[in-house]
Amino acid sequence: MTTFSQFLLSRFFWRNLGLMTLVTLLLVGVAFLSLNLYTHHGESITVPDLRKLTIEQAEQRLKSLNLRYTVLDSAYQQELPPTGIIEQSPKPGAKVKENRRIYLTVNATNPPLVPIPNIIESSLRSATVQLELAGLRIGQQIRVPDLAKNVVLEIKRNNVSVKPGDRIPKGSAIDLVLGDGLGSTRIVVPNIVGLTFLQAKLILKGHYLNVGLITKEENILDMENALVVRQSPDPGPDGDRLISVGEPVDIFLRENPESQALRVLMDTNTTQTLPQLPTNPPQNNN
């Protein structure tokens, strides 16, 4: 024990212990320094906004910042070019270390195929909504004679008829063949001269015709009971003139002498213009 105690108290022991401690501290310091240099401790890179860039543009941008990328997924957006960046992770503005990998969602080179919705016999407004939900858009609106106004009668793409369920590229435009509300049916022009305006409107409606331009005398008191004195087009000399369904018929009106409103007015005016009789008849002095 005496010898061991003497060794611990010797200069040789303490000198070697000091050297070992110094070497250990140096090794630890070098390790920390190397780790900081490798990880760039305290340094970070701001992730750029790569959205709407092409994959080639994004690659150049990331390479200049010592960042990497991986295409994680693809989708389709019509407004972006093929391989345009739709989304990224981490988000723009995030702080990352050098050599970090950025995951990208890119626009598909070819748009996906989507089925045409069944819009036959749908109104134009309903068809527009259905096509937008399907990722399609309306091209030309072609109107043909048909009583069903603005109702889809046929679907075309590039002047070729297509049918509901056909799959076409998303974002494509399809043309709609719509009814014009008139139709191609031709009917005999009804004779409405001598009828009241109310009766004429009912007759025209029953023949699927419309009231056109109305020309009337001034100060007609009872419009509904005014008389039709002329019409255009007229029935023709033989009463067999034809026009298309939905066409307008112009009407010329004058006051109806049988109108109740006119009678009331005439009675009122007559009463007002009668001479005032004296209350007591004049006395004959003879």
Image (cartoon, rainbow, N blue to C red):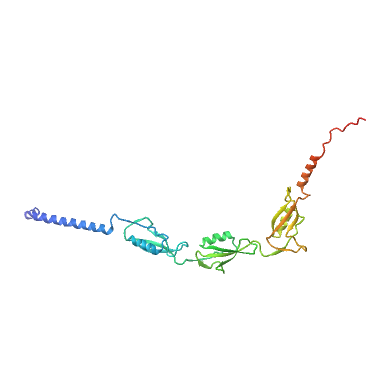
* Residue in front for this viewpoint, 245 or 1: 245
Is 183 displayed left or right of 267 in the figure? Answer: left
Which residue is at the far right?
A: 286
* Quarter placement of the C terminus: top right
| Residue drawn at point x = 15 percent, y = 57 percent | 20
| Residue drawn at point x = 78 percent, y = 42 percent | 269
Is residue 67 in sight in this rendering? no
* Residue in front for this viewpoint, 282 or 154: 282
Point out residue 146 in the picture as x, y percentages from the top left corner. Answer: 64, 64
Is 272 displayed left or right of 74 in the figure? Answer: right
| Residue drawn at point x = 70 percent, y = 54 percent | 214
Which residue is at the far top?
A: 285
Point out residue 185 in the picture as x, y percentages from the top left corner. Answer: 68, 65
| Residue drawn at point x = 28 percent, y = 58 percent | 39
Point out residue 225 in the picture as x, y percentages from the top left corner. Answer: 74, 51
Is 177 displayed left or right of 172 in the figure? Answer: right
**Location of residue 183 (image quadrant):** bottom right
The relative height of residue 165 versus residue 90 in the rendered view (above or below) is below
Point out residue 201 in the picture as x, y percentages from the top left corner. Answer: 71, 55
